[in-house]
Image: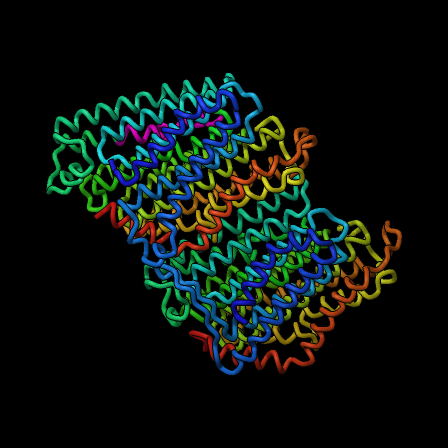
Amino acid sequence: MDKGLLAYLLIPLLSAVIIPFAARRRALLADILANVTLLAGLANIAWLALRPSVIQGGFADIPGDGFSLLLVGAVYLVALCVTFFSAWFMPEGQPNRAAYYSLLLVSVSAMTGVVTSTDFFTLYVFIEVLAVTSFALITTDESAGGIEGALKYFFLTFPASALIIVGVAVMLLSLGSLSFESLRIAMSAEAPAAAVTFSAALILLGFLIKSGVVPFHTWTPDAYQGAYAPVSAHLAGIVTKISGVYAIIKLATLLRFFDGRAQALSEMLMFLGMLSIAVGALAALRQTDFKRMLAFSSISQVGYIVLAAGLGTPLAVMGAVFHLINHATFKTVLFLNSASVEKATGTTDMDKLGGLEHSMPWTSWTSVVALLSTAGVPPLSGFWSKLLIILALWEAGLRGYAVMALLFSIVTLAYFMMMQKKVFFGKKGQAAESSAEVSAPLLAPAVLMCGIIVALGLLFPYFYTYVKVVAERIIL
Amino acid sequence: MLTTAVAVPVFGAFLIPFAARISTAARNTFAVLLGLFTFLAAASLAGTVLGGQTADFLVSFPRGFDFILRADLLSVFMASVSAFVSAIILIYSIDYISHYENQTEYYAMVVLFLGSMMGLVFSANLLWMYVFWEMTGFASWRLVGFFRSDKDVAKANKTILVTVFGALCMLVGIIMVYFDHGTLDLRQLHGATISYAAAAFILVGILSKSATLPFSTWLPDAGVAPSTVTSLLHAAVLVKIGVYAYARIFGVTFAAPDSFSNLVLYIAGASALVSAGAALIDTDIKRIIAYSTVSQIAFIFLGLASGNKTAFAGAMLYILMHSIAKGGLFLCAGIIEQNTHTKDINRMGGLFSSMPVTGVAFALCSLSVMGIPPFGGFFSKFLVFSGAAQNGNLPVMLMFLAGAVMTLLYLVRLFYKIFLGEAAGHGNPKEGSWTMVASVMALALIGLALGALIHYPSAYVDLLTNALGVNLQ
């Protein structure tokens, strides 16, 4: 464990324990406690990483490898948006309000555990805690869709956990240790033992399933679509990224893809990444449900991260990390907006929606910003991360992948244009007639995230410096 | 002045919704002021660049993605022309747009468009050219989709998808340049060679934005937008971006291979002929003028790709003359469309008696586009042709001569159908409001004045060609 960041794990856990007792008399206390905990954590992280003196020093004072801190920041940010949104989204007197917030906070703890763990067993434990909390969170509103989504999530990610634990066992037998450091040292040998690579491949496969990469993607649309609305933002924005994609990036650096130690694994990862980009984007074109389309879009965007992680060069890892953060911002906005649309109109079926821009201008425009960032339109943040990934691919001589990755942006843009046309522009549908803009607190998270998208795009040099520090520390 | 010319419209655009909170009048005034200010800021740089100086502004970005703005003869010329036409369009919009919904978005997007255009022309880094290129694409998406029926939104989506596809191809070309030369700074790339593949990818981007064959279909479709928007797209900004990028990248920076320039000539020739033919048979007033734009843009490419100084200078003049004249034509079309409630030229006819001022302005602008002396359009067309003759490519010459004759034909047909002949099924509509009529008349008279005072603009473009041109004979 990275002990410097332990507090970020323990404090939400503590809050999670207190909430059911505190909220027994006053349900409102649950909202307040959850939000305050996360806000305090976020403020603390901002202080650590964004002090003027730290920025001027080129982020050299960042504790640990910088990657954990960045991801803990992302976890807190998304979770804060989700809890703040939920506080106003949940109907009064929802029976399991306290349980909902407790579970959210436990999942925040688990994610912090995932990103700060330094050995595979700890990683596995936190991944499982995360899986169980997500499973419970999906069913929050106890609808049939939610239960279906939760079951699919559970059954399809269960084999992944099995693969990971088998991989961990094989690794313990062959390597004699489970720490990340020992794997890194083993891989830097001239000819790493085959059994070690095999165990790492098993673990990698487990995480590929968890992150919903094609061909293991079938559970994600159902889980996201069925999940309780704010929970789908939580899942898509951060949970699957931490429980799957983060581990893939980490493994890519541990397996030293950049110096070609695990050539076959690296090529397989890149191929699956490209496949995800293509399949996710093309499938999203055919969706008629808002949330389902976003889920397929998620698959496609995860493809970019996996593609870059598979390449594994410092520039590619920078691109992957940057895209992971960007994905957290724009996907959270889009899923929260889909939740707002669902609250205002009662449906997410795009054929029934339409013309919402007049009644919901803020939701409409924040969606535009987020979708343009997803499609990589400059000067928003998504453009820079995609550019880094594509430059890295080109630099490594993989021009075919680079051009394909670039041109699939047009498909991304196409399905989002279609979405925007069906939901916000175009003729007023039946559902749009009676709907009004959701209240300001529900918009605040989306607006905040849009601000971050624009700021990350315009302040790219600072963020680049940070991500460069991260890439140098985790690769070397 | 350089940074303000870019920053004021770009950031000002986002303040327009707040100005709209105060009152409609405040918003309109603010938008027009932003337009006028941008024009003045751009034009005020002319003194610097005419003195042989350049103005630079640099923000350092990692990996050689530095944000560089540079004012030189070419960028100040393009910026002033487009900002001037945009400012006129903004003034005209006040009345024209006042009956519709989404006005605040409209003003914000027009000003953002103008700002992105300023950023594009002043950028001296290919990556930042691309950034602003995409921003104009975004603004045009919102502007073409101004009316919100399914058909309009679908055509807006077509516009952005075609242009973004082109832009992504261009980005591939830019990445090739980046890895070939290790930099994207156009100042350092001056005179460098460019590989055929990179040039071809960049060309796809340029052709898609300037609506040249085979990417021309989105431009006539974009005619569903309000006339002010189409005028902005055609005359002042959008399609000129492609021409500007060509001039900037292949005219004054890289030495393009000869066979590449020849390829461009043939594509442009085909584009001129096909679109002129389409303009001859269409019956929708805005589509005809749109096809005419596609055809005229090809003449500019002819000048830029012919590879000698006469033609290049002609092309520069052509950009100026075409912006003024085509802007005027579209704004006239806006008056006609708004007052007759139709876009079908078969249902117009005999409008000259009811809208005399618009008719005169329309005639003057048409004459300039046709290239009749003493209008400005004559000189630019003449220079382009004489330059192309020096290049000595006979098939291309013939294609363009045919194109020029067809220009004459379709514009005469258009004028006849609208203003002369029998009145066909309309109740003698009234003339446009005075700001609208004054705007079109101003553009028409400027077209005439530029012809009379051709000495000054041509001296400027000669200076530009001599100072910046690369690989020109």
Q: Exactly how many numbered labels are in the figure?
A: 0
Main SS class of the magenta portion in the image: helix
Q: Is residue A218 magenta?
A: yes
Residue at x-position 37% and y-position 29%: A14
**Residue A96 located left or right of residue A114:** right
Q: Position of residue A299 (x, y in %)?
A: 41, 34
The image shows residue A200 at horizontal and vertical percentages of: 21, 32
Q: Position of residue A257 (x, y in %)?
A: 23, 42
Comparing A114 with A211, the one in front is A114
Q: Quadrant of the C terminus of chain B?
A: bottom left
Q: Is residue A258 above or below residue B190?
A: above
Q: Is residue B100 left or right of residue A137?
A: right
As for residue B86 lying within the magenta part, the answer is no
Q: Nearer the viewer, residue A444 or B416?
A: A444
For the residue pair A323 and B391, the one nearer the viewer reads as: A323
In this rendering, the answer to whether B307 lies above or below A458 is below
Residue A71 position, x and y percent, is 35, 40
Q: Quadrant of residue A108?
A: top left
From this viewpoint, is residue B434 visible? yes
Query: Residue A134 is drawn in which quadrant?
Result: top left
- Relative to residue B424, is residue B144 drawn left or right? left
Q: Quadrant of the N terminus of chain B?
A: bottom right
Report the residue at 36% width, 39% height from top: A72
Residue A418 figure quarter: top right
Q: Range of the magenta residues? A: A204-226
Residue drawn at x 64%, y 80% is B454
Name the residue: 53% across, 81% down.
B50
Drawn side of residue A55 relative to residue B10, left or right: left
Colour scheme employed for the rendering of this structure = rainbow
Residue B278 visible somewhere in the drawing: no
